[in-house]
């Protein structure tokens, strides 16, 4: 009787482990890439809830359990992460464990006026637009309080600026 019970317990545990492994390692085809934004101090529970609501992972509880086993449940780095169309829960955990969010590039062309530069920045997706709606004077006081002139024209260099996705437009 005990041998039979142990045999069934072993079969059950093997089947359970196989299901958990499949939910963790088998990629789910979502049809298109997905972007998840993790805010500062956000935990794995809310991230997994969002991923499950949007149908990106098979099972959020497997994701949470694996995050605790890996020790990344409380080490999520804020930022925006682009996930491929086919992604497994394991791939997601590896990606956010690295803690390197995607970056966004903003190119300011030579000869661009300050108003054009602000419009380019305001139209850039995947960054926080903290200065949208600010006056030129307020923005200049924030980014260059010691500037020789309060006129923003000619005070910025044309270049390509790269910031973490989800970062503030003030970084540019």
Image (tube, rainbow, N blue to C red):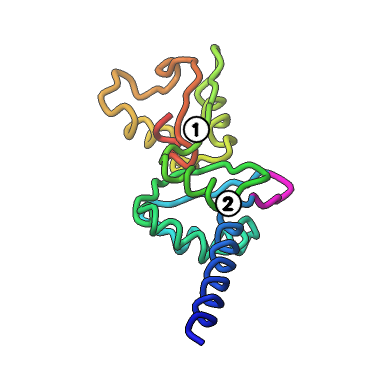
Residue reaching furthest to the bottom: 1
Residue reaching furthest to the right: 31
Up-down relation of residue 13 to residue 80 (above or below): below
At a point 34% along the width and 30% down the height, the residue shown is 143
- Image location (x, y in percent) of residue 147: 29, 21
Q: Dot 1: what SS?
A: strand
Question: 162 or 119: which is nearer to us?
Answer: 162
The label shown at residue 103 is 1
At a point 52% along the width and 43% down the height, the residue shown is 81
Magenta-drawn segment: 27-32
Q: CA distance from mark 1 to mark 2?
A: 27 Å
Q: Is residue 30 magenta?
A: yes
Q: Dot 2: what SS?
A: helix
Question: 23 or 86: which is nearer to us?
Answer: 23
Question: 148 or 41: which is nearer to us?
Answer: 41
- Image location (x, y in percent) of residue 99: 41, 41
Q: Is residue 30 left or right of residue 68?
A: right
The label shown at residue 157 is none
Residue reaching furthest to the left: 146
- Image location (x, y in percent) of residue 22: 61, 57
Q: Is residue 125 magenta?
A: no
Image quarter of the C terminus: top left
Up-down relation of residue 159 to residue 42 (above or below): above
Q: Earlier in the sequence, mark 1 or mark 2?
A: 2
Residue denoted by label 2: 25
At a point 67% along the width and 45% down the height, the residue shown is 86
Q: Is residue 64 left or right of residue 41?
A: right
- Image location (x, y in percent) of residue 10: 52, 71
At a point 43% along the width and 37% down the height, the residue shown is 100
Would you call the spot at circle 1 few (<14 residues within 10 Å), some (14-19), or many (20 or more)?
some
């Amino acid at each position: 009787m005990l041998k039979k019970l142990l045999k069934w317990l072993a079969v059950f545990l093997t089947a359970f482990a196989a299901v958990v492994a499949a939910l963790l390692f088998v990629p789910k085809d979502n049809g298109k890439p997905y972007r998840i934004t993790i805010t500062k101090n956000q935990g794995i529970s809310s991230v997994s809830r969002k991923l499950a609501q949007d149908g990106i992972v098979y099972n959020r509880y497997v994701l949470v359990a694996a995050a605790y086993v890996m020790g990344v449940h409380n080490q999520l780095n804020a930022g925006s992460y682009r996930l491929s169309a086919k992604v497994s829960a394991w791939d997601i955990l590896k990606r956010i464990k690295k803690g390197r969010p995607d970056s966004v590039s903003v190119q300011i062309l030579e000869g661009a006026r300050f108003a054009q530069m602000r419009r380019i920045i305001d139209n850039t997706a995947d960054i926080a637009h903290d200065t949208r709606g600010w006056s030129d004077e307020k923005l200049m006081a924030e980014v260059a309080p010691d500037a020789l002139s309060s006129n923003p024209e000619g005070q910025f260099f044309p270049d390509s600026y790269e910031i973490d996705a989800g970062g503030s437009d003030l970084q540019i």
